[in-house]
Amino acid sequence: MKTKNLVITALITILSISPASAVTKVIKVLPVKPILITTLSGSSGDQISAVSTTATEIALVGTVESSTASQVTTSSYLGGSDGFIASIDPTGNHLWDLHLGSIGDEIATAVVRDKVGSFWVFGASAIPATPPIPTAPDSTTVNIDNVVIDPITNSNNSLTQLMAWKVSLTGQLVATYSYDAGGVVNPNSVTFDGTTLLVSGLIEDQRFTVRVSQTGEFTKFTRVTSKAVVAPAITTIKAGTGSMKSFISKGAIKGITSWKPKSAIPVLIEYNKAGAITRASYFQGNVISVLWQSGIGPIVITERSDGYGINILGLAK
């Protein structure tokens, strides 16, 4: 019996000092190939402004400037610039899309989902929800050329109407609401607290906030004078039990000795809950949106020379 105990003790000692336990994962910064590159409508004014995700769907919100067919926006064009919302699955397959607007100019810049999964898209319009009443021709005016004079309508080319579009899970427009903001308005953030929607953004040289009920009532519109917000050089994002950091890399990265970029380039580093690097990626173009979705992993929207890239990295192993 004593001999057996000595053998077991020896084995435990050998395993505890085995060099294999000291092996560490070599991390390299690897390029990411987008699952989808879209040119939207083909206009230089097109943009993707916001993203909303679930484990099975990615909704893209933005603005298109013309009616040219594209990989993402295929629904009917409404005139001027239009807001849009388009849905794809995690492999890049198109599910549905919808243009948002009227005969004038509209933009779509923020999105959130409510309790039942409906999308609330916010933006701005140059056209009031209620069209102006045309001015009738003056019958007393002498028209020596006998030319019919068209009624005069009030024009409005400024994006002063704060817009809210409610869209169903399947991409159907449920309702449209508007609020006269009294200045050129650009919402850039919206959250849902389970009861109301809180929208914030810029109105001319000020910031604003406003609450919107689920029946489209705008309340507590507030302007706040503030200094320009400078984006942080490094953005940290919660990613499940770990975290991600997005930044422009101009040189060495701590913990990745092989990384020696020749120029500044967008990089995303993923960390586990212990703070160790699990994956590092770099992207072509400019990173305009980074988020993490349970069941999918990091989703990065990039603006490239050939269009917008939708990058899905998957879950780190």
Image (cartoon, rainbow, N blue to C red):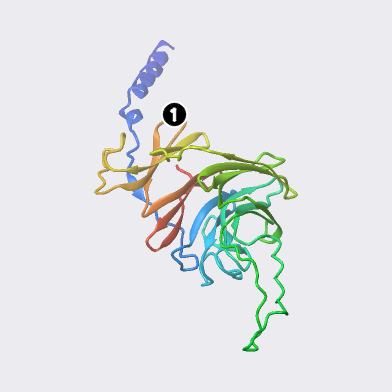
What residue sits 45% from the left and 40% below the top? 228
**Regarding mark 1 in the picture, which secondary structure is present there?**
loop
What residue sits 36% from the left and 24% below the top? 15
Closer to the camera in the image, 283 or 82: 82
The quarter of the displayed image where residue 234 is located: top left
Q: Is residue 30 left or right of residue 115?
A: left
Q: Is residue 51 left or right of residue 32?
A: right
From this view, report whether residue 47 is shown above or below residue 273: below
Indicate the quadrant containing the C terminus: top left, top right, bottom left or bottom right. top left
From this view, report whether residue 236 is shown above or below residue 60: above
Q: Is residue 174 visible?
A: yes
From this view, report whether residue 288 is shown above or below residue 156: above
From this view, report whether residue 283 is shown above or below residue 305: above
What residue sits 65% from the left and 72% below the top? 152
Q: Position of residue 26 (x, y in %)?
A: 32, 39
The quarter of the displayed image where residue 146 is located: bottom right
Q: Position of residue 28 (x, y in %)?
A: 32, 43
Q: Position of residue 6 (x, y in %)?
A: 38, 14
Closer to the camera in the image, 50 or 22: 50
Q: Is residue 295 visible?
A: no
Task: State the residue position of label 1.
Answer: 274
Give amino acid for label 1: Ala
Q: Is residue 247 left or right of residue 57?
A: left
Indicate the quadrant containing the N terminus: top left, top right, bottom left or bottom right. top left
Marker count (numbered): 1
Q: Position of residue 247 (x, y in %)?
A: 38, 42
Q: Residue furthest top?
A: 2
How many neighbours does mark 1 have within 10 angstroms: few (below 14), some (14-19), or many (20 or more)? few
What residue sits 41% from the left and 38% below the top? 232
Q: Is residue 23 left or right of residue 270?
A: left
